[in-house]
Image (spheres, helix red, strand yellow):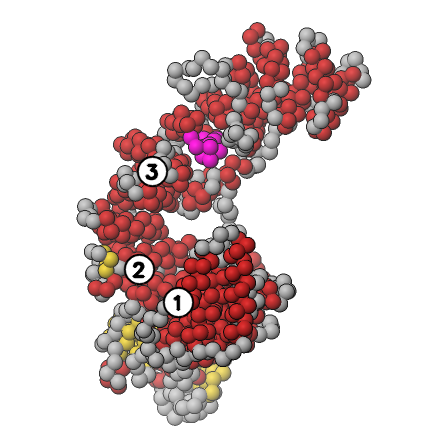
C-alpha cells in the first residue's frame, strides 16, 4: 500500500463549511449543525464505504473544533473503524478522529469527572490493541501513525506517575517495550526512530520506574547520539536529557560522544549536504548539542552537588569542547553574508558562550566572546538583541568576568545598554536592566545608580518595580558612604513611590522597609536621614533638569518611610529651627488626606508618638481632633486605631499609659536575609550559578560537614552511593570477567579480556601510590566477521570506594576512539589514598556496536593495596626475624598479624612461591631448597604505599604437607588491620583460577 493516492475533494464537506460560514446569525448556524448531526447519525446506521465515513467524520471534527463539543457524543465507533483500515488516508484520519473523540467521550458521554491518570488509562484501554497491531506492522507508515498518536495523546505536563501496582500497568509496559524496540532496533528506519524517541520520552515520563529499575536500556538509548542521521540525534536529545536527569551516573559516558559529533561538524566540517542551512552546517544540531552539554553541567544530584565537572572528563573531550566553542565564537565574529547565515551563526554563538564558562575558558576567549556579543546588540532584529543580552548576562555572571566593567569597556557598554533600555520591546528592556545589574561593581555602582535614577521617571510601568529593587540592592551591596546611601535611597523613594491609573504602586513595600531596617540598625544614619526626609517632604526630588515650576506630588513610599523614621527619631533634629517637630508634623499632616488608608494608619501611629514625646506642643489638639474624627471612619483599621489612640491620650493627663505603650523600636536581627534578593527575578538565578562573591549566591553556600571521622569511629566502611542504588553486583559482570581480573593480580601485563569481537590487553605502570593502567582495545571482529567496531564508549567507571573519603581515586586520562578498525588505546590513572578493602575494586563498563549488534562489557579490575608494594632492603634472615618480632611486640598478633591456610589444586615448591612473591613486588629474603622432605619456607618483605602513609609488610609462606599442596601464609604489617587485607589478597592470588 502506498501513501501516494489521487486526491479526492470532499465536495459535501466543502459545501457544508461554506453554508455554516454564510449563516446570518448563531441561531441559523445551530439549526444547520443540528440538522447535519441528525443526518450523520442516520447515515452511520447504514453501510458506508471508506470515503463516506471519512466525509462524515470530517464534518463531525469540524463541528467539534468550532465549539460544538457537547452536541457531538458519537463517532468514536466509526473513527475506530477508520483507524483499523489498511488504507493510509483512512487510518491517518482515524487516528486523528480518535484522539479528538476519546477526549470528548470521556468528558461528555460518560458524565464522570476523571483524574488525568484515569483519563490516560481510558484512552489506552480503547486503542491499545490497535496501537500494538500498527507497531508490529511491517509498514513503517503505520508504525509512524501509531507512534505519533502516542506522542500526542500521552504527553502530559503534570506529574502523572503510573506504577507497577496500578491497574493496567501491563498495557503500559507492553507499549513502552514496543516503542523502545523501535528506538533501538537496527532494522527500523530513521523516520520511525525519530518519532519513537519523542514518544518514548512521553511514555517514560508517565511510567519512570521502567528506567529507574532497568538500567540495561540506558546504554542502548545513549547510542542514538552516535548515529549518522542528524535528525534522529536532534529528536533523541530530549529523551536523553530526561533519562540522564533520572540516572545522572551515566552523564559522563555521553559527553565524549557529543564532543566528537560537535568536533566533526564544527571543526572538521563533516556534514551531509542535506543538513546544510544555506552555508551553515547543521546549525540546529550544533545548538541542541551545545545546549545539551550545558544542561548536563547544570545537573545536580539529590544532595544538590554538581553531577558533571571538568575533572570527571578526559583531556581529549575537554579539548574538543573548547575547540568547538572557540571556533563558534570565531565564526560569529567574522563578517557573514546573508541574513540566514548570520542568524544561524548568532544562535550558535549564544549557546557557545553559555557553555564556555563551564569549560574554564581563558580570559582572552571570554573577552572575545563578549566583544562579539556587544556587536550583536546593535542588530536591527529584536530576537538577536534579546539573545545577545541573555548570553552576555550568563557569560558575565558565570565567568566572574569584570571585562565589561573595566575603565576601557564600561563606558562603551553602558552607552549601548542604556540605549537598549529605550528599546521598543519590553523583553529587551528587561534583559538590558538585568545586564546593568550584572556588570555593577564597587567601582561603577555610583554611575549606574545615577543613570537608573535619571531613567526611572520615563521607564515603562512594568519595569519601574524591577528598577527600584535593583537600585536598592546595588546601593546596599556596594555603598561605602552612608550619606550617599541614604540620599540615594530617599531619592528613589521620592521618585518611585507613585502609582498608575489603577492605583497600583510602582514600588513594592520591601524597598522602603529594607531602608528602614538599615536606618534602625545604624545610629549614625538616623539623624542624617531625618534631615533628608524633611527636606524631601518640603521640596520633593525632581529628576527634570529644568526643575519644572509645577508642584511635584509626594511619593507614598517616601511618606511611609517618613512616618516611621520621624516618629522614631524626629526628636533628634528638633533643635534645628526649620526642621523641628512642628515642621515635621505640619508636613505629614498636610499629606495625610492624600494618601492610602494603609499609609494613614501609619501616620496615626506617628502622630501618637509625636504627642507622647511632645505633650506640650501646639499641635497636640490637632492630633486629638484627628483621632476623634477618624474614630468614626468607615475603614475598620483606621477606626480601631484612632479609637484606641484617643483613649490612650484622654484617659490620663500625663499620658502615662500611652508612654508605656510607645517603646523605642528595637534593632533588627542582622542575620535577616535581604527580602529584595527574592525579587530580583531571573537574573538572580543566573548570577547565582558561579559567582560566589555575589550576595545572591552567599545565602546558598553551606559548609559540608567532615564526616570521615564519624565513619572511622564507628567502623563503618559501607560504600555510600549517591544515586540510591546498590553497588554493582557480581551477577551484573560480564561472563568470563574473572580470568582477566585474576591475571592482573599476578602480572603487570597481559590479556584482560577476549571474545570473538574484541580483545583487551593491559599494562600496569606503578609509581609508589600512583598507578596507570594502559589498555589496548583490539578489534577481533576484523578476523572473524570482517567488521569494524563502532560507537565504542566508556559507559561508566564505577568506583566502589566510600564516597565521602575514598580510599582511591580514578581518572580516565585517555578514552579510546569510537571507531576501532584495528586497535585503540585507553589510560586510567589511579591514586591510592588509604588502605583499600578487597571488595572495593572498580567496574569498567563499555559499550560498542559491531555488525549491527549492541554489546556491553562490565569488567572488574583489581585496585588493591598490594598493587602498590615495592621491595624493601632487608638482606638477611636475622634482620627479617628482628623486624618480625618488633611488629609482634608493637601491635600484637590480633592487629599486626594475619594467618591463612591454603589448599592448592596443584603442587608448588619453594621456587614457584619465591617467583610469585617477586612478581607481585616483594623482596624475597629467604627461600628453602627444592629438595624432598624439606618443607617449604619462603619469606619476603616490602613497603606498601598510600598517599596518606606507608606500611612495612613481612610475609612468610610455609608448607604444611610434604607435597606442596597445603600452605600456611602469615603476614605481619606495621599498620593495624592492614595484614588482614594483604593476607586476603594473597589468598585469592593462590586459590583463584587462571
Magenta stretch contains residue 463: yes
Whole-angstrom CA distance, mark 1 to mark 2, is: 43 Å
Mark 1 lies on residue: 11
- Establish if 937 lies above or below 392: below
Secondary structure beneath label 1: helix
Q: Nearer the viewer, residue 79 or 343?
A: 79
* Mark 1 in CB contact with mark 2 (< 8 angstroms): no
Mark 2 lies on residue: 285
Secondary structure beneath label 2: helix
Q: Return the x and y of residue 284 as percentages of the image width and height.
A: 30, 57
Residue found 63% across the figure and 62% down from its top: 113
Visible residue check, residue 445: yes
Which mark is in front, 1 or 2?
1
Whole-angstrom CA distance, mark 2 to mark 3, is: 32 Å
Which mark is in front, 2 or 3?
2
Q: Earlier in the sequence, mark 2 or mark 3?
A: 2
Residue found 31% across the figure and 34% down from its top: 416
- Establish if 208 lies above or below 569: below
* Mark 1 in CB contact with mark 3 (< 8 angstroms): no
Whole-angstrom CA distance, mark 1 to mark 3, is: 68 Å
Magenta stretch in the rendered image: 459-472
Mark 3 lies on residue: 402
Visible residue check, residue 803: no
Magenta stretch contains residue 504: no
Q: Nearer the viewer, residue 484 or 951?
A: 484
Q: Return the x and y of residue 109 as percentages of the image width and height.
A: 60, 67
Quadrant location of residue 988? bottom left
Q: Earlier in the sequence, mark 1 or mark 3?
A: 1
Secondary structure beneath label 3: loop
Amino acid at each position: 500500500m502506498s501513501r501516494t493516492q489521487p486526491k479526492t475533494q470532499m465536495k459535501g464537506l466543502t459545501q457544508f463549511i461554506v453554508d455554516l460560514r454564510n449563516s446570518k446569525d448563531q441561531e441559523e448556524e445551530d439549526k444547520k449543525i443540528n440538522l447535519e448531526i441528525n443526518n450523520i447519525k442516520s447515515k452511520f446506521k447504514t453501510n458506508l464505504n471508506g470515503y463516506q465515513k471519512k466525509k462524515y467524520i470530517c464534518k463531525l471534527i469540524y463541528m467539534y473544533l468550532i465549539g460544538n463539543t457537547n452536541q457531538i457524543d458519537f463517532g468514536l465507533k466509526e473513527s475506530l473503524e477508520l483507524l483499523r483500515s489498511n488504507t493510509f488516508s483512512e487510518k491517518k484520519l482515524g487516528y486523528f478522529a480518535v484522539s479528538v473523540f476519546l477526549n470528548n467521550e470521556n468528558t461528555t458521554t460518560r458524565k464522570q469527572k476523571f483524574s488525568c491518570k484515569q483519563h490516560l488509562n481510558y484512552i489506552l484501554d480503547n486503542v491499545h490493541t490497535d496501537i500494538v497491531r500498527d507497531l508490529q506492522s511491517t509498514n513503517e507508515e503505520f508504525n509512524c501513525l501509531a507512534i505519533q498518536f502516542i506522542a500526542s495523546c500521552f504527553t502530559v505536563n503534570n506529574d502523572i506517575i503510573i506504577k507497577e501496582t496500578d491497574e493496567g500497568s501491563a498495557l503500559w509496559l507492553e507499549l513502552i517495550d514496543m516503542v523502545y524496540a523501535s528506538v533501538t532496533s537496527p532494522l527500523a528506519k530513521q523516520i520511525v526512530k525519530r518519532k519513537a524517541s519523542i514518544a518514548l520520552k512521553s511514555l517514560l515520563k508517565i511510567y519512570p520506574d521502567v528506567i529507574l529499575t532497568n538500567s540495561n536500556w540506558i546504554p542502548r538509548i545513549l547510542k542514538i547520539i552516535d548515529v549518522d542521521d542528524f535528525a534522529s540525534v536532534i529528536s533523541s536529545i530530549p529523551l536523553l536529557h530526561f533519562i540522564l536527569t533520572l540516572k545522572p551516573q551515566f552523564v559522563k559516558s555521553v559527553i565524549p560522544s557529543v564532543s566528537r559529533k560537535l568536533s566533526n561538524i564544527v571543526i572538521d566540517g563533516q556534514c551531509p549536504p542535506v543538513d546544510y542551512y544555506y552555508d551553515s552546517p547543521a546549525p540546529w544540531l550544533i545548538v541542541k548539542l551545545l545546549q545539551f552539554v550545558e544542561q548536563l553541567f547544570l545537573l545536580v544530584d539529590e544532595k544538590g552537588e554538581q553531577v558533571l565537572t571538568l575533572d570527571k572528563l578526559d583531556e581529549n573531550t575537554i579539548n574538543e569542547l573548547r575547540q568547538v566553542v572557540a571556533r563558534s565564537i570565531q565564526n560569529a565574529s567574522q563578517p557573514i553574508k546573508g541574513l540566514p547565515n548570520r542568524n544561524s551563526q548568532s544562535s550558535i554563538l549564544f549557546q557557545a558562550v553559555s557553555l564556555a564558562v563551564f569549560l574554564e575558558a581563558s580570559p582572552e576567549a571570554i573577552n572575545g566572546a563578549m566583544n562579539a556579543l556587544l556587536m550583536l546588540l546593535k542588530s536591527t532584529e529584536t530576537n538577536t538583541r534579546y539573545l545577545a543580552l541573555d548570553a552576555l548576562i550568563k557569560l558575565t555572571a558565570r565567568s566572574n568576568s569584570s571585562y565589561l566593567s573595566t575603565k576601557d569597556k564600561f563606558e562603551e557598554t553602558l552607552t549601548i545598554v542604556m540605549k537598549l533600555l529605550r528599546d521598543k520591546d519590553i523583553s529587551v528592556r528587561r534583559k538590558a536592566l538585568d545586564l546593568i545589574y550584572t556588570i555593577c561593581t564597587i567601582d561603577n555602582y555610583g554611575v549606574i545608580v545615577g543613570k537608573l535614577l535619571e531613567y526611572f521617571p520615563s521607564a515603562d510601568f512594568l519595569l519601574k518595580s524591577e528598577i527600584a529593587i535593583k537600585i536598592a540592592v546595588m546601593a546596599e551591596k556596594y555603598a561605602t558612604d552612608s550619606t550617599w546611601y541614604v540620599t540615594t535611597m530617599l531619592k528613589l523613594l521620592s521618585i518611585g513611590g507613585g502609582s498608575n491609573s489603577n492605583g497600583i504602586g510602582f514600588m513594592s513595600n520591601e524597598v522602603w522597609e529594607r531602608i528602614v531596617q538599615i536606618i534602625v540598625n545604624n545610629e549614625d544614619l538616623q539623624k542624617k536621614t531625618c534631615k533628608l526626609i524633611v527636606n524631601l517632604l518640603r521640596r520633593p526630588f525632581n529628576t527634570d533638569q529644568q526643575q519644572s515650576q509645577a508642584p511635584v506630588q509626594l511619593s507614598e513610599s517616601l511618606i511611609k518611610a517618613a512616618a516611621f523614621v520621624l516618629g522614631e527619631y524626629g526628636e533628634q533634629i528638633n533643635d534645628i529651627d526649620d526642621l523641628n517637630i512642628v515642621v515635621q508634623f505640619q508636613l505629614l499632616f498636610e499629606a495625610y488626606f492624600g494618601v492610602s488608608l494603609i499609609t494613614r494608619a501609619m501616620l496615626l501611629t506617628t502622630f501618637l508618638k509625636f504627642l507622647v514625646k511632645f505633650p506640650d506642643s501646639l499641635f497636640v489638639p490637632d492630633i486629638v481632633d484627628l483621632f476623634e474624627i477618624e474614630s468614626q471612619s468607615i475603614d475598620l483599621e483606621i477606626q480601631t486605631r484612632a479609637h484606641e489612640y484617643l483613649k490612650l491620650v484622654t484617659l490620663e493627663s500625663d499620658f502615662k499609659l500611652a508612654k508605656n505603650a510607645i517603646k523605642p523600636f528595637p534593632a533588627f536581627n542582622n542575620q535577616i536575609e535581604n527580602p529584595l534578593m527574592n525579587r530580583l527575578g531571573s537574573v538572580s538565578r543566573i548570577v547565582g550559578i558561579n559567582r560566589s562573591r555575589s550576595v545572591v549566591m552567599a545565602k546558598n553556600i553551606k559548609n559540608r560537614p567532615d564526616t570521615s571521622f564519624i565513619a572511622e569511629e564507628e567502623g563503618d566502611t559501607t560504600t555510600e552511593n549517591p544515586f540510591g542504588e546498590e553497588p554493582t553486583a557480581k551477577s551484573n559482570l560480564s561472563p568470563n570477567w574473572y580470568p582477566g581480573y585474576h591475571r592482573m593480580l599476578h602480572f603487570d601485563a597481559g590479556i584482560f579480556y577476549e571474545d570473538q569481537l574484541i580483545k583487551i590487553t593491559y599494562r600496569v605502570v606503578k609509581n609508589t601510590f600512583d598507578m596507570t593502567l594502559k589498555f589496548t582495545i583490539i578489534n577481533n571482529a576484523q578476523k572473524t566477521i570482517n567488521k569494524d567496531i563502532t560507537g565504542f564508549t566508556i559507559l561508566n567507571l564505577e568506583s566502589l570506594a566510600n564516597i565521602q573519603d575514598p580510599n582511591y581515586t580514578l581518572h580516565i586520562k585517555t578514552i579510546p576512539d569510537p571507531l576501532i578498525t584495528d586497535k585503540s588505546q585507553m589510560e586510567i590513572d589511579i591514586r591510592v589514598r588509604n588502605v583499600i578493602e578487597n571488595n572495593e575494586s572498580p567496574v569498567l563498563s563499555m559499550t560498542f556496536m559491531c555488525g549491527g549488534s549492541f554489546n556491553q562489557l562490565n569488567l572488574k579490575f583489581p585496585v588493591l593495596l598490594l598493587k602498590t608494594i615495592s621491595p624493601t632492603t632487608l638482606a638477611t634472615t636475622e634482620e627479617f626475624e628482628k623486624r618480625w618480632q618488633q611488629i609482634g611486640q608493637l601491635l600484637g598478633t590480633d592487629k599486626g598479624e594475619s594467618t591463612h591456610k591454603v589448599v592448592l589444586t596443584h603442587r608448588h615448591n619453594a621456587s614457584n612461591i619465591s617467583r610469585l612473591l617477586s612478581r607481585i613486588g616483594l623482596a624475597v629474603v629467604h627461600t628453602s631448597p627444592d629438595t624432598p622432605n624439606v618443607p617449604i619456607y619462603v619469606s619476603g618483605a616490602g613497603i606498601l604505599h598510600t598517599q596518606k602513609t606507608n606500611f612495612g609488610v613481612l610475609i612468610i609462606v610455609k608448607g604444611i604437607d610434604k607435597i606442596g599442596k597445603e600452605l600456611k601464609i602469615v603476614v605481619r604489617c606495621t599498620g593495624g588491620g592492614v595484614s588482614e587485607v594483604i593476607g586476603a589478597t594473597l589468598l585469592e592470588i593462590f586459590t583463584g583460577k587462571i
